[in-house]
Amino acid sequence: MIDFSIDRDKCIQCGECAADCPAGIIAMGDYPEMTDEGRCYRCQHCYTVCPTRAVSILGLTPEGDQPEKELPSPAQMKDLIKWRRSVRRYRDENLPAALIDELVDTTFHAPTGVNAQGVVFTVVRDKAFMDKLRRETLDRLGALADAGKLPEGIISQYLGFAVKVWRSEGRDAIFRGAPHMLLTSTPPGVPCAVQDAHIALTTFELLASSHGLGTLWDGMFMMALAICPELRDTLRIPADHAIGYAMLFGRPDVQYHRPVKRGPAKVNILE
């Protein structure tokens, strides 16, 4: 139920809610009215754009003090993006569960196509589970390698190397000793499943970086997951979900003293 309502004592008939509605389903008469609840995106634009707190929707009422927003400066955002690194060395310690929950809850605000909000976050919150996942993954890959069943090409090259160094050195080349992992997936019917899953992880990565945490887009685990689908059961990912991507995270056990130098950007300029 959309439950769109207008407090007529507060409404100043400015029309902002109607003008900003992406579905175009709010009409201005004497007061705003929703003309087709079935096409509502549930984006809450009408709720957030109202200057006098007259709009309520989805059971949300704009009561209380107006919240203050604290945006990072352009210089701070520039530093956050340029100083972000792919971290492959982590401290062997759990992050506070409350911090992980805060990161994921904030990440859920990332944009999704048609505001579907269909991304599901599978979160490894304890390094003991990561140890279990690490052993199972490398055991399964080792069995495939011994049987000559690793797919040829880059998968065999990378995952064969991971098995080799795990057996000879006890070195984890897939999870890099990270205590935590975040994996995105989407159920059937999500209109922009691939884009939504990747936007969510990009949002999480920058948010985690702002907390001084390290992250890594884990392509090697994605390879392992593709040839060892049983790992989906270990992670309790529904069989009908499309996998987005996996991201490792935790407190880094390395410090970078300067950003990399890249560019100039490859740009197609139209004037």
Image (tube, grey):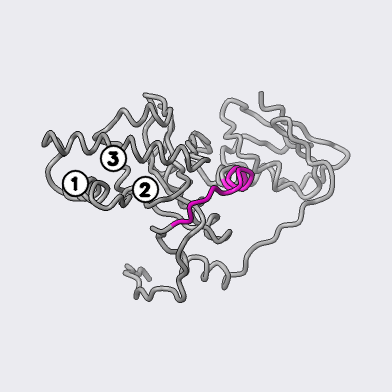
From this view, report whether residue 60 is shown above or below residue 73: above
Q: Residue at x 44, y 73 (%)?
A: 259
**In the rendered view, does 41 fall on the left or right side of 158?**
right
Q: Is residue 57 visible?
A: yes
Q: CA distance from mark 1 to mark 2?
A: 15 Å
Magenta-tinted stretch: 90-103
* Badge number at residue 160: 1
Q: CA distance from mark 3 to mark 1?
A: 10 Å
Amino acid type, label 3? Leu
Q: In this figure, which residue is indicated by the disc labeled 3?
A: 138
> Which of 269/235 is in front?
235
Sequence-first tag of 3 and 1: 3
**In the rendered view, does 4 fall on the left or right side of 262?**
right
Q: In this figure, which residue is indicated by the disc labeled 2?
A: 175
Q: Is residue 97 magenta?
A: yes
Amino acid type, label 2? Phe
Q: Is residue 189 visible?
A: no
The N terminus - image quarter = top right
**In the rendered view, does 143 fall on the left or right side of 41?**
left
Residue 83, position as x, y percentages in the image:
47, 69
